[in-house]
Amino acid sequence: MVIPKPIKIGAATPYDFQGSNMTAYGGLLPVVTMLEKLQFQELIEQHVTIKRLTTSMPGFRFVLAMILGIVRGLLRLNHLQFLGREPMLTGILEVGELPVQSTFWRFLASLHLVVARQLLEVGQQMRQRVWEAAHVGLKEVTLDTDTTVQTVYGRQMERARGITRNTAGRRAISRS
């Protein structure tokens, strides 16, 4: 079996949609380019405490591999095995092949509870950078997460029929 050589991937990497190196995972390149421009690696290295020294990849690359797996729609760490030798992904991560699943689990187990708060800080910084890059100058953002379902009798205004599987006849509020 011939193992393809990893390609050095960066923000300046040319790409097209007809080239011989285009893969099913080629959509990762714009994501990685965005992360590089937003200095994601520097944020992780500054804010996240990673004490475990690994021989297969630096801590940042483990985090990046898991994020890229999520972007690709992988639901579990063991799904990374399907991408283990994908040239685009290994080129982005600068490795010959991805570590085995147990290495990812040991890496995650080595992270302390304080890392969760640190990752929230990284997420906040990334959102701020994206909004600044997009020149979004909102002073306030309101997220409406109201999922209230009220029982309605008759034909009430501003009501829409909702889907409530367990209770027939209930309606969801529609706020237009």
Image (tube, helix red, strand yellow):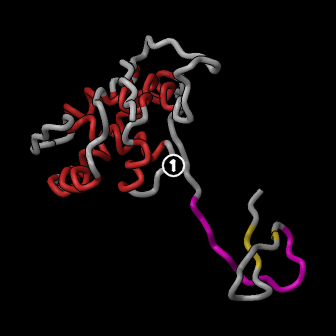
Asked whether, in this view, residue 175 is left or right of residue 51, the answer is: right
Quadrant of the rendering where the N terminus is positioned: top left
Give x and y (percent) for residue 172.
73, 73
Q: Is residue 54 above or below residue 40?
A: below
Give x and y (percent) for residue 139.
50, 34
Could you say which is closer to the camera, residue 152 or residue 73?
A: 73
Residue 8, picture quadrant: top left
Give x and y (percent) for residue 115.
21, 50
Q: Which region shows up in magenta? A: 145-157
Could you say which is closer to the camera, residue 71 or residue 152?
A: 71
Question: What residue is shown at x 63% (from left), y 73% (from top)?
Answer: 148
Residue 112, picture quadrant: bottom left
Question: In the image, what residue type sits under mark 1?
Answer: Gly
Q: Residues within 10 Å of mark 1 (few under 14, many from 20)?
A: few
Could you say which is closer to the camera, residue 61 or residue 42?
A: 61
Residue identifier under label 1: 73
Question: What residue is shown at x 76% (from left), y 73% (from top)?
Answer: 162
Q: Residue furthest front?
A: 1
Q: Is residue 71 above or below residue 101?
A: above
Q: Is residue 50 above or below residue 131?
A: below
Asked whether, in this view, residue 5 is left or right of residue 29, the answer is: left
Is residue 150 covered in magenta?
Answer: yes
Asked whether, in this view, residue 93 is left or right of residue 51, the answer is: right
Q: Residue furthest right?
A: 155
Give x and y (percent) for residue 121.
29, 42
Q: How many marks?
A: 1
Asked whether, in this view, residue 93 is left or right of residue 49, the answer is: right
Q: Main secondary structure of the magenta part?
A: loop
Q: Secondary structure at mark 1?
A: loop
Question: What residue is shown at x 74% (from left), y 75% (from top)?
Answer: 163
